Amino acid sequence: MSSRNLLSDLIKTFSCDIKDLDCMYGKCEKCKEINIITNDQGDNNEETSWLQWKTKKEKRNIKGDEKEITLTVKETVTDSIHVLMDAFSTEMQRFKIHAFNIANQMKHYRNIKENLKPNEALVHVDFAENFQCKLANEIQSMHFWASKKQLTLHTGVFYTALSSQTFLRSVR
């Protein structure tokens, strides 16, 4: 079973209709209070630990100047089972909205693409910022950041009713 199906099954346990905006946005009277996470085995105040991604600011000395940078790190959090269950429920609500938006957006995108008229076009553009250039055979000093060139890649597909064409543009 794919991870996509597992996530879809998980979302279904928190919603009465995964295709309904109100259900997925937590506004449905039938399912907005669904909470399948229970701890029948013990005390919800018992302490537990879990890993969680967090964004932190840190001061670093860069070329003689102190600068504040933002890092995303995985940290161990220790708190009560109750806090973990609340955090999971909050994240699940956010994830339900995210999953609904993706599915709905893809459905509309596919519909537009499949029903293009002869005088219409659909342009899908994406970009990869700070794409790092590499050489197949680099000397050791080339391996470090200061020597690397970066660019932004703009990739896309141009669709018409009868054909499609990919394109790429790079910006330094």
Image (cartoon, rainbow, N blue to C red):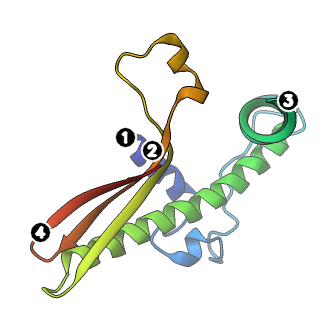
Q: Secondary structure at mark 4?
A: loop
Confirm whether residue 115 shows in the render.
yes
The residue labelled by disc 1 is 2
Q: Residue 123 sits in which quadrant?
A: bottom left
Identify the residue at image location x=12%, y=85%: 118
Of pointers 2 and 3, the one earlier in the residue sequence? 2
Residue 93 image point, x, y percent = 65, 60
User: In the image shown, does 67 or 108 lie closer to the viewer?
Assistant: 67
State if disc 3 and disc 2 touch (CB < 8 Å): no
Tell us which disc is closer to us: 1 or 4.
Answer: 4
Q: CA distance from mark 2 to mark 1?
A: 7 Å
Confirm whether residue 43 shows in the render.
no
Residue 2 image point, x, y percent = 37, 40
Above or below, 13 against 58 in this view is below
Q: CA distance from mark 4 to mark 2?
A: 35 Å
User: In the image shown, does 38 or 57 lie closer to the viewer?
Assistant: 57
Of pointers 3 and 1, the one earlier in the residue sequence? 1
The residue labelled by disc 4 is 163
The residue labelled by disc 3 is 64
State if disc 1 and disc 2 touch (CB < 8 Å): yes
Residue 100 image point, x, y percent = 50, 66
Amino acid type of the residue tagged 4 in the rendering: Ser
Q: Secondary structure at mark 1?
A: loop
Q: Residue 168 sits in which quadrant?
A: bottom left
Q: Secondary structure at mark 3?
A: loop
Is residue 26 left or right of 10 when viewed as pictured? right
Above or below, 123 against 141 in this view is below
State if disc 1 and disc 3 touch (CB < 8 Å): no
Q: Secondary structure at mark 2?
A: helix
Instruction: Assess disc 1: are there few (<14), some (14-19) or many (≥20) residues with their C-alpha within 10 Å of its C-alpha.
Output: few
Of pointers 4 and 2, the one earlier in the residue sequence? 2
Amino acid type of the residue tagged 3 in the rendering: Gly
